[in-house]
Amino acid sequence: MIEAGQPLIQIEDLTKVFYTDEIETHALSGVHLSIRKGEYVAMSGPSGCGKSTLLSIIGLLDTPTAGKYHLNGQPVENLDFGARSRIRNQEIGFIFQSFNLIGDLTVYENVELPLTYRQKMPSADRKKRVVESLALSFTAFGRSTAACSSRPRARRTSLNSARR
């Protein structure tokens, strides 16, 4: 857990290089970033400038080539796959541009799904969190599939899934 005033995310001199047989692509070079708990941060820039690469590293989906990355005050560069998966499951929420909702599931089921991967969360607690997160009853909203949802509804569903 982080101490008061300490950054939630601290990145220092981060570099990411992609290698192929013939080409070396420098996606990130010397990135410094500090984000404190409760801050809202937006990233923008032209296509190919490294936004998605940086987000993949912050989300522990990829590793940097060099540099330091601390999450909750702990270094993450050398975490194994299992540790990264546990942190993603319990501490990081993802909201994708396309929302990544499963069209055959209801809105309720799309919000509940990430919680099913949490160990030691009883079904009753999971269901309560979903209803609270949606702030709607299952009967009023549960019959719509995500594929039939409007973009604003899909956005809310994706946000609720990430907040879990």
Image (cartoon, grey):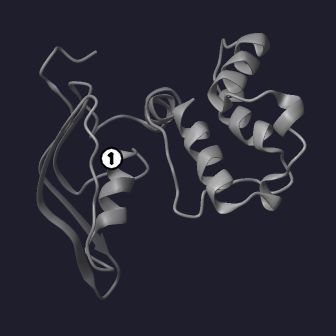
- Residue visible at 44% across and 50% down in the picture: 61
Q: Position of residue 98 (x, y in %)?
A: 59, 64
- Front in this rendered view, residue 151 or 29: 151
Left or right? Give the position of 14 relative to 104. left
The residue tagged 1 is: 58
Taking 108 as reference, is 4 above or below it? above
Q: Is residue 46 above or below residue 5?
A: below
**Quadrant hosting residue 139:** top right
Q: Considering the numbered disc 1 on the image, is that residue within a helix, a strand or a loop?
A: helix
Identify which residue, 19 or 53, lies in the foreground.
53
Q: Considering depth in this image, is 136 or 2 the residue closer to the camera?
A: 136
Give how far across and how far down residue 3 sits, in percent: 17, 14
Residue farthest toward the bottom in the current orientation of the protein: 22
Q: Quadrant of the C terminus?
A: top right
Q: Count numbered badges in the picture.
A: 1
Q: Residue 19 in the image: x percent, y percent?
A: 30, 74
- Residue 145 is situated, as x and y percent measured from the top left of the image, at 84, 51
Q: Residue at the spot x=31%, y=65% of the render?
A: 51
Question: To which quarter of the image does residue 106 belong?
Answer: top right
Category of crowding for the residue at label 1, using alpha-carbon neighbours closer than 10 angstroms: few (below 14), some (14–19), many (at least 20): many
Instruction: Please give the name of the residue rendered at 71% of the width and 19% of the height, measured from the top-left corner.
Output: 126
Q: Is residue 10 above or below residue 128?
A: below
Give the residue displayed 69% in from the left and 37% down from the top. Answer: 111
Q: Amino acid at mark 1?
A: Ile
Give the side of residue 132 with respect to residue 12, left or right.
right
- For the residue pair 66 and 74, the one nearer the viewer reads as 74
Q: Is residue 127 left or right of residue 9?
A: right
Quadrant including the N terminus: top left
